[in-house]
Image (tube, rainbow, N blue to C red):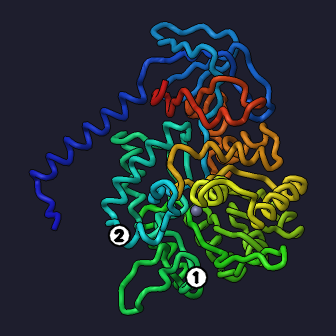
Amino acid sequence: MFAYNPAMRKVLTRFLAVTFTLSIAAAAQAPVLLRAAAVLNVETGAYTRPGMVLVENGRITAVGANLTAPAGAKTIDLGNLTLLPGLIDAHVHLFLHSAPAGQRVDEQGQTVHESVPERTILATLAAKADLMAGFTAERDMGTEGAGSADTAVRQAINNGFIPGPRLWISGNAISIVGGHESARGYNPALLIPDNATMVTGVNELIATIRQQIKDGATFIKMYETGSERMVNGEFHAQYQFTEPELAAAVEEAAREGTFVGVHDNGEPGTLYAAQAGVASIDHAAQLSPETMRLMKEKRIFAVPTFAIMEYFNSVAGGGRGTPSATEEYKAAEFRKQIAAGVPFAMGSDVGPFPHGTQGSEFTWMVHYGMSPLAAIQAGTIHGAELLRADKNMGSITPGKFADIVGIAGDPLQDISLLEHVQFVMKGGVVYKN
Ligand SMILES: [Zn+2]
């Protein structure tokens, strides 16, 4: 279909030249001096007041209370804002959107009724909404039936064609036949797409990992637990992959220079994942003492995703009533996990609820017992560590990307300020002011 000929080559060359010029222009922008009320050091919780940050060629080159703008620099006065590093949401779904008010979203319904092109257009809007809310980097935990379409969104962002966060993507993600994300309850004669790629055994698992990376995935997402229920106050989650299968996936991902993140809500699936050495255990409702010990020892991050649970219980459930048994259980387990020293990254599972509103995850983490500073660390420096990008992101430090957000007030006093980000810079480019 695509015949490569000299005329086409000319067009392609011109296109690439324009793209290249655009990226050079972005890289060679004039120095920018940001002047704000304060800069938060997310590692110590200390403030620099006033807070000034010098940005050159997309990176931070100086931070202090008393910087002088170099010749030719542009100064942006941010008044009473407090500056933080760009927020990192380690669990999003750009290819899912929320249902109309009062209805519970049907994820499978989106796969059935909406084409992949339609979903990709909506994903570009989701990426913009998330960036404008202060999320300068995100880990997309599966397109939920849209295959490798996340590669197109990531490339369009990286090429500067559309605004959006820096993205880590997992394509369609991986589950087991008949397991989590299976299209169930349909006439078996119909070809209904599953919301993940279903595999059986290590051979199919490895083949699928290789295919997803070939198609553009930058990490591997697996569904380690399926159906869940509470029985007499005790939480049960069915495991899907065995520990050797997870270990084979971790090894294959490592061979490709990347990692595995799992949807994993309870034992023994959480223990299997910790033993196999995944990078994160997402949802993480139930972690045994041995699982928590391994997570602390290996720096495996728990990603609690309270926002999605709260959304389903309140908005979609028709008004917030008393917490559900699962919410109470999860909150109590979360406090045990904090006490055990489990490392946390912030992840909201946004998609089924509106993109750009996931700053609420910080509020919920604090509501359920985490300190504001620890919640901010989860959504900045720990997120960067989980993405193996802490050399470039996660704090306002000279040498790192100029990914910076501003909020009106002190987030250590009022964490909900992170739900109202006023200023967004990514790679030295201002997207919101
Ligand atoms: Zn998810």
Image-quadrant location for residue 225: bottom right
Count of marks overlaid on the render: 2
Mark 2 CB lies closer than 8 A to ligand 1? no
Residue at which label 1 appears = 179
Kind of residue indicated by mark 2? His
Is residue 380 positioned above or below 193 on the image?
above
Kind of residue indicated by mark 1? Gly
Percent from the top left, x then y, of residue 414?
74, 31
Percent from the top left, x then y, of residue 405?
58, 30
Tell me the quadrant of the picture where the N terminus can be found: bottom left
Q: Nearer the viewer, residue 291 or 254?
A: 291
Q: Nearer the viewer, mark 1 or mark 2?
A: 2
Percent from the top left, x then y, of residue 24?
36, 31
Q: Nearer the viewer, residue 264 or 323?
A: 323
Residue at which label 2 appears = 113
Residue farthest toward the left in the current orientation of the protein? 7
Residue drawn at the location 36% of the way across and 57% of the way down? 120
Residue drawn at the location 60% of the way across and 23% of the way down? 61
Q: Nearer the viewer, residue 236 or 375?
A: 236
Q: Residues within 10 Å of mark 1 (few under 14, many from 20)?
A: many
Q: Of label 1 and label 2, which has the lower sequence position? A: 2
Q: Is residue 147 visible?
A: no
Left or right: residue 153 compared with residue 329: left
Marks 1 and 2, how far apart in space? Answer: 21 Å
Residue drawn at the location 59% of the way across and 46% of the way down? 358
Image-quarter location of ligand 1: bottom right
Percent from the top left, x then y, of residue 261?
63, 64
Q: Is residue 75 visible?
A: yes
